Image: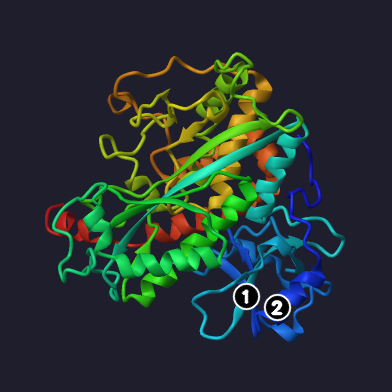
């Protein structure tokens, strides 16, 4: 596997002079210099535009990638330098965008992270994805991805002890039941979605469709297919834009995998295919239009390695509440043609659009790590020329679980998978596991209402 390739992302050629001119033309006052952390939270600094310099660069402590979702740091900090030294942030100039919800003229730029010697920070989720793409390019291939991202709109919830509830729409009423694909149910929140579309246009997020999903006030958006880094940037920004837009309309938007116990969970399905760089053709299809050997090897790689990658696709204790039999979520890595009960669905398509839909990831996952892990599993199958199982033509819900059932099992599977660790980066895996093990340990200290309800006076 290639080790530590430098700046492997394919970036648009954008001169810094053009960015400075764009800042002046838009009267930008401040710039958000952001990086996605392990969870997918935007970390960074807010800088006056007049003081922002691409050449000087921003600095942050290396340990930022060890911060948990609760704001703590794990005991195992072996992945970082004991001195907690600085890392340097270099902007991807093509990522400069205006922040549409900011009161003052503000821009944001997504940054990559480097050490003083110019080497990339291996723990950075954006770099992990770039590293996987470099491994594809070494073989003359370029992946293409398209996410489907689900989320819920909910009433503001100021007390975490109370369950979430659907919000009130234009009619003045909350949804009484599930309204799959209802146009009227989407129209209940027209003012919010009009603003969201405007925000996405300003952020250069290419939305393809919006529809109502099965849950009460549960929505799904599809992003147009494209380069994995650019698409992950869009998914990263879309989550933030949706939360900000909902707040403007006195609602919350949540990407929790299972926010309400009696409603279906939210997924982040990833459609993926691979292009031959020289020929510009889909390697999943043969010249005659039939499915190629590489296509089946890619599926086989997903089948073999997705259980080990599970903690990247289902990164939180809540993630595993979604993956329940008969609850519109996969419980195994079987595959099939146009079969929504399997973990790996092959949609009907023309040969040039042949792809695999990975239905395992949850909406709560970091999009960079989901795409990196899913593509890494498929690549390992292509490299080793693996063969998949037979496609499932009936319901895969009736078949046994073959994915980890909780975060602890998933973290152990990743730790023990040498091929995946080499491809994603051992230092990254060490840091990621340390963060998630800390979060899991913190969760185990919480006593739930279910325990008080059923155990307090009965055991």
Residue furthest to the front in view is: 25
Residue 93 position (above or below residue 358): below
Image quadrant in which you'd find residue 252: bottom left
Image quadrant containing the N terminus: top right
The residue depicted at 32 percent of the width and 48 percent of the height is 265
Q: Which residue, as the protein is rendered here, is positioned at the far right? A: 117
Horizontal and vertical percent for residue 380? 64, 28
Q: Nearer the viewer, residue 351 or 41?
A: 351
User: Residue 155: x and y, percent?
Assistant: 26, 70
Q: CA distance from mark 2 to mark 1?
A: 8 Å
* Residue occupying the point 68% across, 24% down: 383
Residue 251 quadrant: bottom left
Q: Is residue 212 visible?
A: yes
Q: Is residue 45 left or right of residue 309?
A: right
Asked if disc 2 and disc 1 are in contact, CB closer than 8 Å, the reply is yes
Under circle 1, the secondary element is strand
How many circles with numbers are drawn on the protein?
Answer: 2
> Given this view, does label 2 or label 1 mark the residue nearer the observer?
2
Given residues 406 and 194, the one toward you in this image is 194
Which label sits on residue 23?
2
> Which class describes the residues within 10 Å of circle 1: few (<14), some (14-19), or many (20+)?
many
Residue 99: percent from left, percent from top: 56, 74
Q: Position of residue 316 (x, y in %)?
A: 43, 53
254, above or below 294, in the image:
below
Q: Does residue 174 sit above or below 143 in this rendering?
A: below
Quick one: label 2 or label 1, which is nearer the N terminus? 2
In this picture, residue 74 sits left or right of residue 192: right
Q: Residues within 10 Å of mark 2 (few under 14, many from 20)?
A: many
Q: Is residue 252 left or right of residue 346?
A: left
Residue 458 is marked as none
Dot 1 corresponds to which residue?
107
- Asked whether, in this view, residue 204 is left or right of residue 342, the answer is right
């Amino acid at each position: 596997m290639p080790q530590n390739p430098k700046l492997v992302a394919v970036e648009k050629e954008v001169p810094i002079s053009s960015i400075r001119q764009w800042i002046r033309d838009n009267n930008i006052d401040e710039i958000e210099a952001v990086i996605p952390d392990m969870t997918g939270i935007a970390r960074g600094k807010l800088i006056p535009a007049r003081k922002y310099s691409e050449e000087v660069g921003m600095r942050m402590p290396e340990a930022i990638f060890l911060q948990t979702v609760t704001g703590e740091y794990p005991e195992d900090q072996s992945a970082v330098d004991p001195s907690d030294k600085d890392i340097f942030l270099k902007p991807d100039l093509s990522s400069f965008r205006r922040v549409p919800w900011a009161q003052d003229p503000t821009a944001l730029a997504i940054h990559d992270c480097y050490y003083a010697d110019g080497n990339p920070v291996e723990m950075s989720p954006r770099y992990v994805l770039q590293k996987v793409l470099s491994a594809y390019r070494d073989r003359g291939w370029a992946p293409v991805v398209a996410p489907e991202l689900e989320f819920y709109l909910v009433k503001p919830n100021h007390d975490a002890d109370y369950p979430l509830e659907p919000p009130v729409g234009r009619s003045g009423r909350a949804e009484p039941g599930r309204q799959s694909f209802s146009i009227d149910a989407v129209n209940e929140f027209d003012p919010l979605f009009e603003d969201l579309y405007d925000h996405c246009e300003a952020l250069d997020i290419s939305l393809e469709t919006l529809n109502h999903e099965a849950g009460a006030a549960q929505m799904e958006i599809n992003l147009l297919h494209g380069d994995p880094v650019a698409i992950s940037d869009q998914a990263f920004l879309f989550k933030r834009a949706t939360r900000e837009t909902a707040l403007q309309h006195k609602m919350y938007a949540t990407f929790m995998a299972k926010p309400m116990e009696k409603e279906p969970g939210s997924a982040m399905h990833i459609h993926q295919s691979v292009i031959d760089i020289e020929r510009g053709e889909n390697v999943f299809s043969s010249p005659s239009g039939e499915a190629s050997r590489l296509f089946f090897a890619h599926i086989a790689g997903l089948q073999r390695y997705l259980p080990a990658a599970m903690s990247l696709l289902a990164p939180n204790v809540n993630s595993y509440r979604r993956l329940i039999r008969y609850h519109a979520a996969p419980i195994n890595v079987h595959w099939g043609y146009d079969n929504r009960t399997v973990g790996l669905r092959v949609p009907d398509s023309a040969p040039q659009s042949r792809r695999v839909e990975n239905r395992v990831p949850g909406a709560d996952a970091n999009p960079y790590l989901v795409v990196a892990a899913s593509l890494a599993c498929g690549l390992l199958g292509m490299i080793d020329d693996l063969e998949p199982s037979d496609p499932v033509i009936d319901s895969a819900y009736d078949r046994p679980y073959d994915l980890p059932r909780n975060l602890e099992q998933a973290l152990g599977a990743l730790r023990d998978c040498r091929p995946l660790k080499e491809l994603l980066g051992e230092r990254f895996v060490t840091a990621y596991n340390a963060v998630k093990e800390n979060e899991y340990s913190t969760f185990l200290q919480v006593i739930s209402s279910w325990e008080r309800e059923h155990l307090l006076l009965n055991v």
